[in-house]
Amino acid sequence: MPDVLVVGGGPVGLAAAIEARLAGLSVTVVEAREGAIDKACGEGLMPGAVPLLARLGVEPRGFALRGVSYQDGQREANHQFVTGSGLGVRRTTLHTALHNRAVELGTDFVYAKVDSITNTADFVEAAGIRAEWMLACDGLHSTVARLAGLHRPAQGSRRRYGLRRHYRVEPWSDLIEVHWNRLGELYVTPTADGMVGVALLASKNTSFEEALAASPALAAKVSDPVTELRGAGPLRQRTTARVKDRVMLVGDASGYVDAITGEGLRLGFDQARAAVAAITSGSDYERDWARITRDFRLLTSGLAFVATTPLHAAVVPLARALPGLYGRAVEQLAR
Ligand SMILES: Cc1cc2nc3c(=O)[nH]c(=O)nc-3n(C[C@H](O)[C@H](O)[C@H](O)COP(=O)(O)OP(=O)(O)OC[C@H]3O[C@@H](n4cnc5c(N)ncnc54)[C@H](O)[C@@H]3O)c2cc1C
């Protein structure tokens, strides 16, 4: 019986598996899909995510990101990261790098969709595998969170969704551009392979093409799409707790606010570290999860709320008028 059963072999599940193997635990990952898994994502690793990956022995090829630029067509507010560079990395590249490292360290993989779990005081079981602990890393619509009774239905009507597409064009900036317009926010992240990804965050049924056309300067630069549109959402997902008996929720499965601050991967890698530490040293994962996600929950909730109100038009002018405040907020989330 393995020590750890990781459900979901996305970036956070793979990071958790590597973390657990480095701690000397035996690990099986159960993942529904084979191959290099793609997903709707802005693909920007914030500066804090890069060393978290490096300490796992994972250094994917990417495009160095030196800061953030908020733009609204008339003005821009730029902030250069002070804590180091982030990295623009295609999801498939990130997946391959993490998967290779997990295999190298002796992780076992089973390809199956988990649709039931057993969670007792003594063991956990899913996909026919019994283990000491289960790390649920099965993403935004976590089956395990639901089966463990930890999912809390979202409230409110301001649901937001994400869409992304890639374009063949030489990156023109080493800043993550965020174009605010009346239909949503468009994130532009260069990746290493002569491509930029454009991710839209907006309300349900917003047309990607219409939102792109609402930022004409950006639309003029990206005319050669190389991937299909891919979407995710609703983004806000809540959980009642992160631990139940021998199950711990990690990454998006533990709850998510919004992609507006480009934070999911860094938080997920940090949560993976904390969850494995809870197994090996008995630390309190619930408390560590709350600490790791506190700024994200506060700042990202606030910004995502503003983005759904008429106040969104004031964001770029304010960021430009108050560079100290804007810079501090970016740094708080980039750590
Ligand atoms: C539009 C958009 C833009 C974003 N931009 C950024 C950004 O720039 N930077 C950033 O850091 N974050 C960003 N994020 C967030 C980031 O994509 C997520 O936080 C990250 O993917 C979470 O990783 P994860 O491994 O927890 O979940 P996922 O990546 O969703 O992986 C979950 C895995 O579990 C598997 N799975 C699901 N259910 C089952 C099951 N029942 N049985 C077996 N396997 C299962 C899936 O196949 C998948 O491989 C963005 C998100 C969106 C939607």
Image: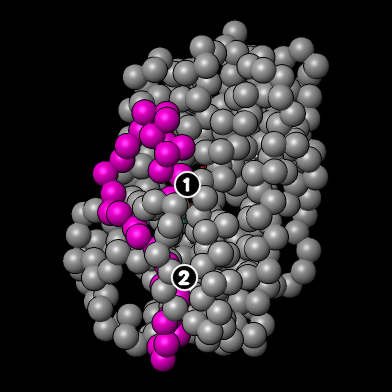
Q: Nearer the viewer, residue 25 or 168?
A: 25
Image depth: mark 2 or mark 1 in front: 1
**Residue denoted by label 1:** 48
Under mark 2, the amino acid is Leu
Q: Which x, y percent locates residue 186?
A: 44, 73
Residue 62 shown left or right of residue 27 in the figure: left
| 175 over 32 or under it: above or below | below
Judge from the rendering whether residue 38 lies leftward or rightward of residue 155; answer left or right: left
Q: Which residue was labeled with disc 2?
A: 200
For image coordinates 46% across by 37% down, the residue present is 52
Label 2: which secondary element? strand
Assign a secondary structure to mark 1.
Answer: loop
Residue 139 seen = no
Whether residue 54 is visible to the viewer of this picture, yes or no, is yes
- Across and down, in percent, residue 251 comes to 59, 42
Type of the residue with mark 1: Gly
Residues drawn in magenta? 47-76
Residue 327 placement, left or right of 123: left
Front residue of 31/201: it is 201
Seen in the picture, residue 223 relative to 161 is either above or below; the reply is below
Residue drawn at x 63%, y 29% is 275
Disc 2 to disc 1, C-alpha distance: 23 Å
Q: Tags 2 and 1 in contact by the CB under 8 Å rule?
A: no
Q: Is residue 75 magenta?
A: yes
